[in-house]
Image (cartoon, rainbow, N blue to C red):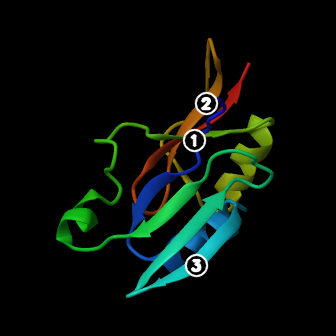
Amino acid sequence: MRQSLHAVTLVVPGYDEAIAFYTQTLSFSLLQDIDLGGGKRWVRVAPAGSELGSLLLAQADGPEQAAAIGNQTGGRVGFFLQTDDFQRDYTAMKAAGVTFEETPRHEPYGTVAVWRDPFGNRWDLIEFI
């Protein structure tokens, strides 16, 4: 049996704003944008060249979901963007206006820096050793 993680839902304030950030600022690929009716869409994005895993961007529906935007993992880093060239991507992301919470640091597993998307979600940019 072969399984893989297809997508992880990320609750966002609006589809178009989230698509713009992930595709324009981070250069992710827009994999799907399907109208489901009633204001809902099936929107998946993934890092350019990624073969497995994606984000399913879900527009908040109601106050409970809206309250979770940016805090879906209780304030912890919940998303990890792996790179094959940390310095290249760190420099490009900073130039694109991405907010880093710290300067890059070297850990036993690799080089890492925490950043936030414009919705408040905490991410690691990480290059593993």
Q: In the displayed structure, does residue 15 sit left or right of residue 73?
A: right
Quarter of the image where one finds residue 127: top right
Location of residue 72 with respect to 11 vertically, above or below: above
Quarter of the image where one finds residue 61: bottom left
Residue 49 locus on image (x, y percent): 80, 51
- Alpha-carbon neighbours of circle 2 within 10 Å: few (<14), some, or many (≥20)? many
The quadrant the N terminus occupies is top right
Residue at horizontal 38 percent and vertical 72 percent from the top: 13
Please name the amino acid that badge 2 sits on.
Val
Residue at horizontal 59 percent and vertical 64 percent from the top: 44
Q: Which residue is mark 1?
A: 5
Proximity of marks 2 and 3: CB atoms separated by less than 8 Å:
no
Please name the amino acid that badge 1 sits on.
Leu
Q: Earlier in the sequence, mark 1 or mark 3?
A: 1
Q: Secondary structure at mark 1?
A: loop
Location of residue 32 with respect to 53 vertically, above or below: below
Q: Which residue is mark 3?
A: 34
The quadrant the C terminus occupies is top right
